[in-house]
Amino acid sequence: MNQIAVIIMSEAVVRSMNVEMYWLKLGCNFAQVDRVFDECMKEAKALLSKEGINVYIENARFLGKMGRGPEPLLIYLEEAPGVAHEVGEKALVDLREFAHYMSTHTNFKAMVPFLQTSGSVVRRLHSYEVFKQYIEVVRDMMDRTSGSVHGHHTTFPSPGLPALLKQAPRLLSALSMEGFRNWIEYGITYYNNHPENQEEYFSLQSADAIAVMQRERHGTLLVDNERKLDCYMRSLWNDHDQMIPYAVAFEELRKPMPYFDDNGIRLPDVYDDERGVDGIDRYRASLAHMAAHRRWSQKMIVDNWSPFQRIAVETFEDSRVEYLAMQRYPGLRKLFIALHPIPEEADLQLQDVSLINLRLAMVSRAILDPDYQYENADIREFVDRFFAEMEQGESCSANMASLALSFIARTRRQADASSHTHFENTEVDYRDDNRHLWIFIENSDEEESYEKERKLEEEEQEYKGLPPRHYHEWDYNAQSYRPDWVSVYEAAHPRGNAARIDSLLAKHAGLAKRLKAMLDMLKPQDKVRIRYQEEGSELDLDVAIRSLIDFKGGCAPDPRINMSHRTDGRNIAVTLLLDLSQSLSEKAAGCNQTILELSQEAVSLLAWAISQVGDQFAIAGFHSNTRHDVRYYHIKGFSEEWGDDVKARLAEMEAGFSTRMGGAMRHAGHYLKAQQADKKLLLVITDGEPADIDVHDGQLLIQDARQAVNELDRDGIYSYCINLDPKADEYVADIFGRQYTIIDHVDRLPERLPELFISLTK
């Protein structure tokens, strides 16, 4: 018994020491926090990973040092573990950042209700992405009702913000994210100039607020029926996965589709009744379709298939798995038929319109519905071939692919290449987007040269398996974000001959000599020692000896036994973001060099100049080929030295494709935001306005880039544009405000770029 007691006491001592270590890290003197800290850590250890606990304590320490008293810290310690457990540990940073954003404004009193209700809110949202959208909606409401513009300080607090945050769990229990946003929009529109009425509206005390909430209350919410749908999947399909909602409120032009991947099943946060089918049955139809794919579909390599061929394969494979599902559960046929659109065969007579979607929808409907009437001979033949294949009892995805490719070869018309596509009565919205079917081996086109193919292959090999990072894109028409709209693929830029850059620097030796005198004036002179660091560049002997004495004496030693140094007077981090679109390959006006060659010279000289000063800096380039493929090339990382590896990547810069600037700026800001610096500068060098081949509205990407600048500004990142387009006056101010310079004479770029950097950072 004594041994057991000793073991129990030893474990208790170890636990106590661990908690004490985290308490020391927290560095808090609030007695109220001390009283609850042990219980909070007990819950945190049960719900968070070791890394998550470290982030949890770091964020708590940050909130405790803001000077807003103990209450925000207490609530964060109590609520944050539950939030992270519900939607993921990355939400811990979002809680801290938004609380800090409030604390720097006159809305600091809203911090407490925001943190207090965060746990209840995430239990309604069940998704990190939707939680982020919730924060953006609240941030927008705060800025618009308190006079704040793009994150600048306000003169008066938002009257309705605390009330809204207190009512958020109740509102989200009744409304989808779209309804929540619309309800807030109504309050802003009609009560922004009436503070007392605004507070009454957002606290749900006015008849108007209740009426608008009832108006926006519609459909079947996924969060209310998740358990019921999980039982449906387990009992009928012997299948189970996490159901993650996505908000349809942030996409007006193209609604996102259901899908599944390794992380779970994605479904809309709300389904309205449609075509006589209620929302819960729409969820069941979508889940049945995806469960059938998960059971019977096989992946296929599709590099050599055209988009039309892939669409056809998707349709035939969708029909195959639904046929098998209906064989197993005949009652599904009635549900699928009710939700499947009825395409009009008469529309096949339309001229100068792509009808591929219409023909495939007719095939899909004919396979599903025995009573569907149609006359087209080709469709009849392929429907018959489908049933013949299925009756053999050995159908597979590969057989359906072969049948689909034959259908495309037989029925394709010249008008199918038209940019005008007939979509009416063709979209089957309960089906998923079929991303699970595809395997891509190559990303290059067959028409590209062997050398470019080889480079792309090496690049993909180096970053094999690296997933894209998805970013929202701003739709100025709908005044909302398109969620996860842009896919940014990052890679190290291929290497070339570093000697080329050395020769370019030698070419500008005279200019470099003049710049050096200016740079010497910018160099910081003094070093400052930073003591009491857990991690540092060297041991702080005095503190280490004192800690050893404490340890020998039986006291908890101070773990902060290291020290580091920082340069006093200048702490700047800079990212040079280069537009590498196709237009850079054009000759510069009045010069024998291309704009790309001049950019190489200018960036090389600027990189040398920054390295002379000693600032942290990174260099990256970007171009895009639709929203699905924004390429972000790392030329120099913050941790790399200015040397031959960086010069080799600069020497190999090439121009190609288009300029989707907003996504690239957000990605550059993602890395720049993580740097420890007093001033953070994003320097964008471009020769034209944002554009891409899948965007026909010229203002769309301009307004998105403007929104990206505003987002970076909120994160403390100063954006500045060097534009080489003589006509840039027509658009650049719309994006960067006054934070830009137009260089009409591109041949002067190597001289002007370092001078601009010096003026921006002096």
Image (tube, grey):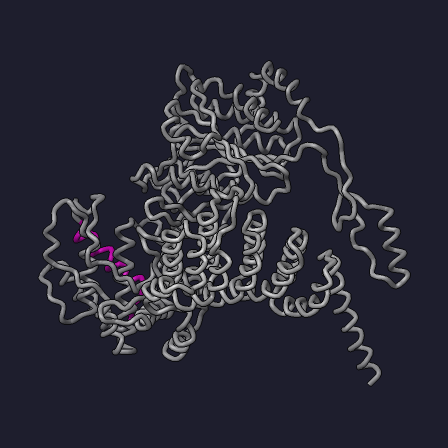
Is residue 66 placed above or below 668 in the rendered structure? below
Quadrant housing the C terminus: top right
* Front-most of residues 230 and 69: 69
Q: Is residue 139 left or right of residue 405?
A: right
Q: Position of residue 745 (x, y in %)?
A: 44, 18
Is residue 259 placed above or below 101 in the rendered structure? below
Quadrant housing the N terminus: bottom right
Q: Position of residue 615 (x, y in %)?
A: 64, 32
* Front-most of residues 187 and 431: 187
Q: Position of residue 540 (x, y in %)?
A: 83, 46
Q: Which residues are magenta?
A: 394-412
Q: Of helix, strand and loop, which mostly describes the magenta segment?
A: helix
Tag count in the figure? 0
Is residue 661 placed above or below 588 in the rendered structure? below
Q: Residue at x 38, y 45 (%)?
A: 627
Membership of 286 in magenta stretch? no
Q: Residue at x 32, y 68 (%)?
A: 219
Q: Residue at x 86, y 62 (%)?
A: 555
